[in-house]
Image (spheres, grey):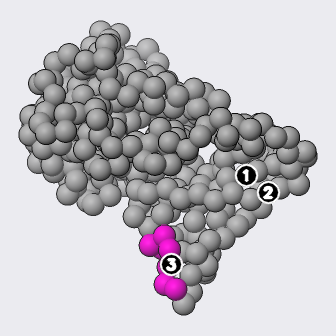
Amino acid sequence: MASMSLSSCLSKSVRQHYMSLPQGEKCQVTYIWIDGTGEGLRNKTRTLDSEPKTIEDIPEWNFDGSSTYQAEGSNSDMYLIPVCMFRDPFTLDPNKLVLCEVLKYNRLPAETNHRISCNKVMEEVKEHSIWFGMEQEYTLLGVDGHPFNWPANGYPAPQGPYYCGVGALNAFGRDIVECHYKACLYAGIKIYGTNAEVMPSQWEFQVGPCEGIEMGDHLWVARFLLYRVCEDFGVVATLDPKPVTGNWNGAGCHTNVSTYKMREEGGLPYIEEAIDRLSKRHDKHIRVYDPREGQDNMRRLTGQHETSNINDFSAGVANRGASIRIPRQVGQEKKGYFEDRRPAANCDPYCVTKMIATTCLLDLEDEKENQ
């Protein structure tokens, strides 16, 4: 078995004694933010005198940006601006988790704070009531980087029995998946479901439908919860888009999209129009669908293992080898949503949803003004 972290072997019964102590009127608030890599999450906790009822009750805070790849040591203070509050499934009520935006010393957004620009776009397209659902694939690893429960020297049986599989030979790490699911529900994350994926030790959870900026907020906190649950179990969750080379599926973050008009009767033409617009900006989308402007996705989008080729745009009904998939039910009912299968597992959901909304809706407004 892949190696576990020593921290996870500490006595849980001893921990439970302290966790069950009353805390009076005080409230622990854990501030969560995206670090300078654009992928990593950081957190720290403070005490408030009482339970916050709204996000406005939570004060701004700061941190040392020189230790998170976000500032120079000579001018390192960064601001944490609370934007979204959840219940804390680890220390329980009344304690809170708070997602924060990061501002630099001059109060401008940090380089990896894409929420502000995303929110601006979502406000501009508010009348369209754009909904997103994102399917987050991830892979479980030991702390040594070897896939969880894979043979120490070699590989498990080929792909086939693992997708939505059951049984000790097919499903690796289900405890983590089920604990994460419960943690999301407790926190108030709009988690939609979960399943085992095609590669052994690979899983997926879905978040949504969420409207506008809520999609990025909920997915980032769901990722934080995944990392924390994995920490308790002594294993690692990676969002690497191609964690194992060879004849194994990669990991994506398929993004389902609909507007009010797409969801109504006769919505299919609006879906087709959006796909046509997406086809004309394929390269721009690929550049924002992983943190390294397509370099990570290049390892995954090969045209094999249920992917399209990174260089080509394609669309089709029920086609998992296409860039954009129209679900069969949508094709039959002539309304609903489409699925963009290009975003990588390690994408920034703010960047993805902003780009899709801009291409499908804002450019449309610009064209009308120019006519």
Q: Residue at x 31, y 13 (%)?
A: 167
Please give the label number shown on residue 47.
Answer: 2
- Amino acid carrying label 3: it is Ser
The 10 Å Cα crowd at callout 2, few under 14, some 14 to 19, many 20 or more, is few
User: Picture coordinates of residue 122 (x, y %)?
Assistant: 53, 47
Q: Which residue is mark 1?
A: 29
Dot 3 falls on a residue whose secondary structure is: helix
Q: Measure how far apart labels 3 and 2 are at the Cα level.
A: 24 Å
User: Picture coordinates of residue 263 (x, y %)?
Assistant: 45, 21
Which residue is farthest top? Answer: 332
Q: Quadrant of residue 146?
A: top left
**Magenta-colored span:** 66-73
- Amino acid carrying label 1: it is Val
- Amino acid carrying label 2: it is Thr
Q: In this rendering, is residue 28 above or below 248? A: below
Which residue is farthest bottom? Answer: 74
Q: Which residue is mark 3?
A: 66
Question: Mark 2 or 1 closer to N-term?
Answer: 1
Dot 1 falls on a residue whose secondary structure is: strand
Magenta part, dominant SS: loop
User: Picture coordinates of residue 351 (x, y %)?
Assistant: 40, 53
Pointer 2 with pointer 1, Cβ within 8 A: yes
